[in-house]
């Protein structure tokens, strides 16, 4: 493997120490705060983009603040790709705990990537910024030519950077 999404997913559990776990637990805590303590209760008319943005921004702010406050947090995270991946996973867990829905969770991942890019200036390192904007256009995409009709695809399917 030469890096990219596949390697990041493979290596995240091994190389992120307890940081990924902390981000996901804090994300779930933030999501439950917005859902009044009830798992997967933000649905239907209670679910709107403003609430999702607040949840995502709160979790993303927590994650990136940890990296800024404690530089050793990023010591085992090589480059910006793992840092961005861990922050996005925390945002995804926040929205998943609040809504119990997959599509808003994928969008949370995307918005986290964009917020990270806005705050830090880049996601990768040494000019490898290929994946900076690759998620937002694919989170609610309909690609009938690449699978069964009416099948909804996830983030940037099938064009993973491997």
Image (cartoon, grey):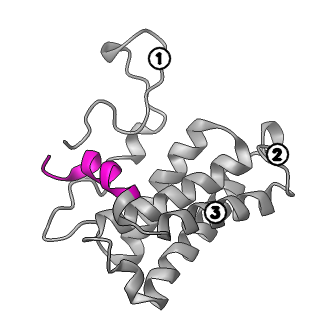
**Mark drawn on residue 46:** 2
Judged by depth in the image, the label closer to the viewer, 3 or 2, is 3
The residue indicated by pointer 3 is 25
- Identity of the residue drawn at 57% across and 68% down: 22
Magenta stretch, main secondary structure class:
helix
Assign the C terminus to one quadrant of the image: top left
SS label for mark 1: loop
The foreground one among 107 and 88 is 88
Categorize mark 3 by other alpha carbons within 10 Å: few (<14), some (14-19), many (20+): some
- Image marks 3 and 1: residues in contact by CB distance under 8 Å: no
**Mark drawn on residue 151:** 1
Q: Is residue 94 left or right of residue 34?
A: left
Q: Is residue 48 visible?
A: no
Note whether 126 is above or below 130 in the view shown: below
- Identity of the residue drawn at 39% across and 42% down: 137
Q: At which x and y percent is residue 80?
A: 29, 69
């Amino acid at each position: 493997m030469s890096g990219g999404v596949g390697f990041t997913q493979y290596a995240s559990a091994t190389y992120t120490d307890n940081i990924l776990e902390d981000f996901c637990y804090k994300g779930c805590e933030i999501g439950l705060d917005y859902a009044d303590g009830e798992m997967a209760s933000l649905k239907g008319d209670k679910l709107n983009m403003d609430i999702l943005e607040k949840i995502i921004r709160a979790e993303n702010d927590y994650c990136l603040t940890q990296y800024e406050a404690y530089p050793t947090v990023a010591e085992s995270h090589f480059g910006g790709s793992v840092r961005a991946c861990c922050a996005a996973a925390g945002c995804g867990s926040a929205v998943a705990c609040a809504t119990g829905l997959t599509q808003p969770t994928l969008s949370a991942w995307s918005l986290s990537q964009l917020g990270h890019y806005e705050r830090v200036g880049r996601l990768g390192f040494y000019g490898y910024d290929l994946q900076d904007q690759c998620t937002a256009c694919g989170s609610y995409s309909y690609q009938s030519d690449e699978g069964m009709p009416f099948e909804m695809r996830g983030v940037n399917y099938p064009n993973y950077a491997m």
